[in-house]
Amino acid sequence: MTAVGVNALEAGYSAVPVLFDLNLQVPSGLFLAVLGTSGSGKTTLLRALAGFIKPTSGSITFGDTVVAGPSSWVPPERRRVGIVPQEGALFPHLDVFGNVAFGLRGQPRIEERVAEVLELVGLGGRAMSRPQELSGGQMQRVALARALAPRPDVVLLDEPFSALDAGLRQRVRHEVRSLLSSLGTTSILVTHDQEEALSIADRVAIVRHGQIVQDDTPSRLYEAPADLETARFIGAVVELPATRIDDSTVMSALGLTEVDISGAPVRDGVLTLRPEQLVIVDEQRVGSAARPEGATGRVHAASYHGHDTVITVTLDTGEHVDVRIPGPVPSIAGDRVRILATGRGRLYPTPLAHGQ
């Protein structure tokens, strides 16, 4: 197994930098997801790790070996890296065996190794099949087998599930994650899909404007984003203007709410909560005298997602908040309700207006 280290990395294209002083440490055997929007630099990072581009400064280490640095450069074919690209990228003129064996040329016992990795990915009987005879999920497993065949120290996955439909995507990505975990392979997945990153990675690194802004466990990343922009990027978020009362309490349209303070100490800021942290209580049953805390409003809309429903409520103070509850709900559009906050929110500094 091999740890990966990225130190003060700067890299880009045609002298235009994309990554700036980027630092990242991936322990041996860990499955890391690199998450970011288009243009954030996540694909450039993957290409630098693979050896497809040379950094202009900084270094990359695999274990004790410096594969890229001021006085070191290991070409891609000698880095012992397996790459699983988008949509599999199989050679259409080769059968499954030929695709998997492609990176094994000149090595002994090729047939035995191909058979071994095809069994690993559940395609033991498809060695003679052509790519066009395979389903999308099978093609991705062939691409994984091809990446694993040379026994790489590190596996890089470049949004490999993006072309699959939703149901298949979920199944295949968990199959791939389980296999890589069982092999103890150090794996780095590049994706723009938050759900994908949170559901299968040991750790998630957020890339923004060419730098890592947070590198944390999925639960910590979701529950304690480093800043407001990260909170907005990772899942749905409810935002309300708030005034700090003390070190752990703020006042907002929802009344008094316990919070963790994020960033510089502020008096006025933005309270964030996840939609599942809000609870709807029937205003007619509870009554404002019985439960004065929280906020009242009227249900504006409900969006059913199968596993849950997101209910949008317009508060009497004018703010709109989303509340996530499990399963379907009866039609409640127009109903008067009271919203209560549960758990702890986060207080962030108010973002500066554009141009400030």
Image (cartoon, grey):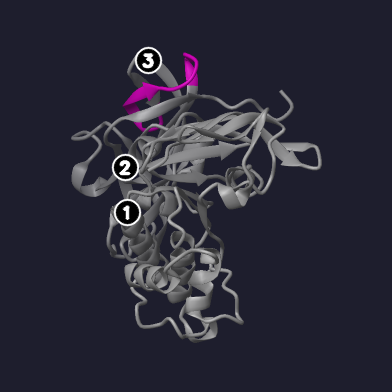
Q: Earlier in the sequence, mark 2 or mark 3?
A: 3
Query: Is disc 3 placed on a helix, strand or loop?
Result: strand
Query: Residue 250, relative to residue 329: is it above or below?
Result: above
> According to the image, label 2 marks what residue?
278
> According to the image, label 3 marks what residue?
245
Q: How many marks?
A: 3
At a point 31% along the width and 62% down the height, the residue shown is 307
**Screen quadrant of the N terminus:** top left
At a point 50% along the width and 15% down the height, the residue shown is 264
Q: Nearer the viewer, mark 1 or mark 3?
A: 1
Q: Earlier in the sequence, mark 2 or mark 1?
A: 1
Residue 243 lies in the magenta stretch: no
**Screen quadrant of the C terminus:** top right
Q: Earlier in the sequence, mark 1 or mark 3?
A: 1
Magenta segment boundaries in residue numbering: 252-268
At a point 35% along the width and 67% down the height, the residue shown is 171
Place of residue 306 in the rendered image (x, y in percent of width and height, measured from the top left): 33, 66
Place of residue 16 in the rendered image (x, y in percent of width and height, measured from the top left): 78, 38
What's under tag 1, amino acid-wise?
A: Leu
Query: Is disc 1 placed on a helix, strand or loop?
Result: helix
* Gap in angstroms between the C-alphas marked 1 and 3: 51 Å
174 relative to 238 in the view: left or right: left
* Gap in angstroms between the C-alphas marked 2 and 1: 41 Å
What's under tag 2, amino acid-wise?
A: Leu
Q: Residue 148's image quarter?
A: bottom left
What's under tag 3, amino acid-wise?
A: Ile
Q: Residue 11's image quarter?
A: top right
> According to the image, label 1 marks what residue?
183
Q: Is residue 295 visible?
A: yes
Query: Is disc 2 placed on a helix, strand or loop?
Result: strand
Q: Is residue 21 visible?
A: no
